[in-house]
Image: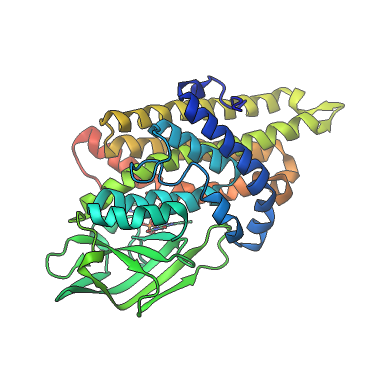
Amino acid sequence: SFTPLASDFYGFESQLTETEREALAGLRHYLETEVKPLVNDHWDRAEFPREILPGFHRQPVFGMQWEETRPFENSAVYRGWAALELARVDASISTYVGVQNGLAMGAIAVTGSAEQRAEWLPKLASGELIGAFGLTEPLSGSDSAQGLRTVATRDGDEWVITGQKRWIGNATFSDVTIIWAKDAADGQVKGFIVPTSTPGYTATKIERKQALRIVQNADIVLDGVRVPESLRLANANSFRDTAAVLRLTRAEVAWAAVGVAVGAYEAALAYATERIQFGKPIAAHQLIQQHLANMMGNITASIAMCTRVSQMLDEGTQKDEHAALAKAFVTSRMRETVAWARETMGGNGIVLDYDVTRFFNDAEALYSYEGTREMNTLIVGRALTGKAAFV
Ligand code: FAD
């Protein structure tokens, strides 16, 4: 049964329904018993625990937003809390969900036809298929609205796609990857559901990554990959449609960033109550209490911001700049928080067995993916001034 999270200082979880709270309690229990014991060893070896996927996909986090796949009606605030719970245990596992559920399924749900939704969403929600989302390229990161080099050329009832992608999460073992490419005819960005067994498609794992080591990222080469017109996302007509997918996931990355901060704070608090220096637990020293209070301030302000931005999604008032501000602000607070947690633990703060160094490193990836702090800041700046500073 549901017990409020001690790190939810102002009791924001009280805004969830009884059904949502129970689902969250089950998810928390699953993550703490089945996932938490695995993460440090898998992080060390940079391995993804694929063996957990059948059980993991039964958790109430996949397809929760879409009528076709959701097991019960739920709010964006519930889905945010689920992202927080995932990242509180491990940011790589939360990233796996963000890619599968938010980006791959989100692209199909937001820009696919009714037939495409019916065909693909249930298989992705159940984990029968694993999805990835290929937007970023070796030469185009922040500027992917204009800078994509990957080209799709119409050839009768087929499209021929040629180009490269970089950083694509889950893509070392995905069954389908959403590929964003410029239409050779009109220059607009279009999306394609590309089965990874298609000739001309290769994905290679990015090695030696020092953040989110559990989640697998790949470089992809598309060499004349042919897909039928039926696999072109029917309602993706320009980058504006891609951005509609990213807005949804950006707000959830903000929630995940709170989860990273909470995970690090909880590990630091537990350590501070046990570690004795100068004859008393370090938690009884004033400056350590200041670290803990600072962390709690960041966490509480971040949950408040995320709660409101999710409510705006359900109310239909959330715009790009609202999700962008949450992502930029909350990931910045996360970065401060994991640094205070690390400092609270002294030398052990850099030893994997004590968890905090994993959160500390992983925070760097959340800070940069789904739009860097700079790009999200510029989206907010454009809304505030009416002037785009990045084009
Ligand atoms: P760049 O765009 O080269 O930026 C470098 C720096 O310059 C940044 O600080 C940036 O903010 C700054 N900058 C750039 N332009 C401006 C400007 N106009 N004004 C001010 N500053 C500017 N992509 C996918 O498509 N699918 C995925 O699944 C995926 N997963 C990822 C997972 C991880 C772990 C990581 C690290 C990345 C992932 N990405 C993915 C890519 C991610 O979205 C990009 O890394 C991100 O958009 C930044 O692009 P970049 O790394 O090329 O940096």
Ligand 1 falls in quadrant: bottom left
Q: Quadrant of residue 336?
A: top right
The location of residue 234, given as percent across then percent down, is 20, 57
Q: Does the image show residue 322?
A: yes
Q: Is residue 200 above or below residue 80?
A: below
Q: Residue at x 55, y 50 (%)?
A: 56
Q: Residue at x 30, y 42 (%)?
A: 378
Q: Residue at x 58, y 32 (%)?
A: 25
Q: Quadrant of residue 252?
A: top left
Nearer the observer, 169 or 156: 156
Q: Is residue 189 left or right of residue 136?
A: left
Q: Is residue 248 above or below residue 288?
A: below
Q: Does the image show residue 211?
A: no
Q: Is residue 286 left or right of residue 388?
A: right
Q: How is the image coloured?
A: rainbow
Which of the image's four quarters has the N terminus? top right
Nearer the observer, 153 or 198: 198
Nearer the observer, 246 or 55: 55
Q: Residue furthest right?
A: 279
Q: Residue at x 47, y 50 (%)?
A: 97
Q: Is residue 28 above or below residue 108?
A: above
How many marks on residues?
0
The location of residue 145, given as percent across then percent down, is 25, 56
Q: Is residue 117 above or below residue 137?
A: above
The location of residue 95, given as percent across then percent down, is 49, 50
The location of residue 246, given as percent across then percent down, is 33, 48
